[in-house]
Image (cartoon, grey):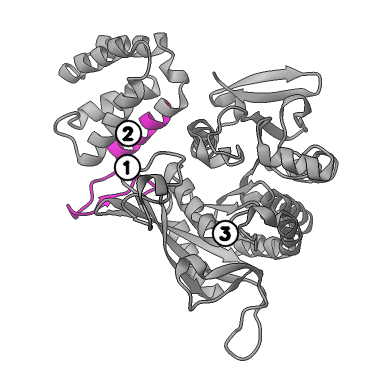
Amino acid sequence: MDLITSAVVAAIGHGAPGHALEAVASHYERLKQAIAKFDGAAAILAAIAALEAEPANTQLQLALSAALSAAKVPDDMETLFAAQGLLDAVQRPPSPLPEVETAPAPADKSAVVSNYAVVKVYFATDRQRDVGKPPAQRFSGERSKGVSNGNGGGDGPLSYGSCDVSIPRDHRMGQLESPSLWRLEFRDDPAKHVVLLSADVQDRDNFFAALRTQIRASAGKSAFVFVHGYNVSFEDAARRTGQMAYDLGFDGAPVFYSWPSRGDVAGYTIDENNIEWSTPHLANFLADFLASTEAAQVYLVGHSMGNRGLARAVADLLAAQPQLAQKITEIILSAPDIDAAVFKHDIAPKLAGARNPVTLYASSQDLALAASKAVHGYPRAGDSGAGMLIVAGVETIDATGVDTSFMKHSYFAEKRSALSDMFYLIRNHARADQRFLDPVDTVAGRYWTFKP
């Protein structure tokens, strides 16, 4: 059976629609709502209703698959993602406490409290810190002056710790819900918004001990490390990491490295200097992380200007300590704000030469990259269209048209198709030709686009 039919049959077998656990019933309704937008929805929903009456009838199962195929539902990433979420809910054991429901992501590590989930994410940062301030202001846009070890000395530029991030129960995939003046919302509400609830600083040893515990508890001993881009505060980096972990259903430890971006549109030049300053710190952290956490599968995800630090740090790390490369499962570069020629000739060969899979998401409608190109005078690695960067060892995906953000620069986390593509990449270790993408062959080589 196809994924969608399998999910429907499994849910019905667990009591849907009227007698299933709340999590299963909720995902079941979400899947049917996703299906309802198609032209052939009436026939599909009728086939589902027939299966609800006779779930073991193989002819009815085949009829549902045929109806789905005729309406091209299996090509729709939103519906496939909803089906996968339903299967996960069916397979997840019920919570022993009736008032606490296991959150759909990441894995089974977070609990839904009342009407929002709490996702724990871990961080390392070389921002200047002030532990006396509220969580959202605990780390500034200034460079760290060194972390005191309590004996009058400094342990270096890094601070470590963990954050709790709320995800509202009615969260929409890919959205970073925030207060809106248009809705007369004047403060954060965990029931409605993705909120940084806490930011607790730890020493290095306790930080890695906590990480090892969570990584060991995951099925694949997995972790991802996210490096944010330009114009991002520590607070928004934490919120974004929690949202990504939740939406990707990530089973493992979500981690973010936060370099001292000013979090200000006007701070582009300062951010450029700061990511360069941070790159050796990031390289040292990645080496420490790979050596100290016992993670067997590590996904490295960079966005925008953060890719400058991540790509160079990984290239240097692979050259200096190639044995650590075995733990890097995937390198994902989204909208990289890197000179395209520099990336193609100096960075990509080092990444691809280590035989670590590399995925690059690009767009021809990315306004932030267009501005960067205007400033620097040369194309960026994240551009697509006529300047699509095609490099041996790198799977380039044209994400043009799948973004909903104003700057069209956060499509890696703000559009269901891009998130769903990352979902299958991470969850199933599927390469581009095994996912829901179309190949485009050019003289320079092949790249991929999202199915229409």
- Quadrant housing residue 259: bottom right
- Between 83 and 267, the residue placed more toward the observer is 267
Residue position marked by numbered label 3 in the rendering:
233
- Quadrant housing residue 59: top left
User: Is 302 positioned to the left or the right of 161 in the image?
Assistant: right
Residue 429 magenta-drawn? no
- Between 329 and 376, the residue placed more toward the observer is 376
Disc 2 packing (10 Å; few <14; some 14–19; many ≥20): many
**Magenta region, residue range:** 80-107
In the image, residue 281 lies at what x, y percent?
70, 65
Mark closer to the chain start, 1 or 3: 1
Mark closer to the chain start, 2 or 1: 2
Does 4 sit above or below residue 353?
above
Position of the C terminus by quadrant: top right
Residue position marked by numbered label 1 in the rendering:
170
Query: Are circles 1 and 3 on residues that touch, CB within 8 Å?
Result: no
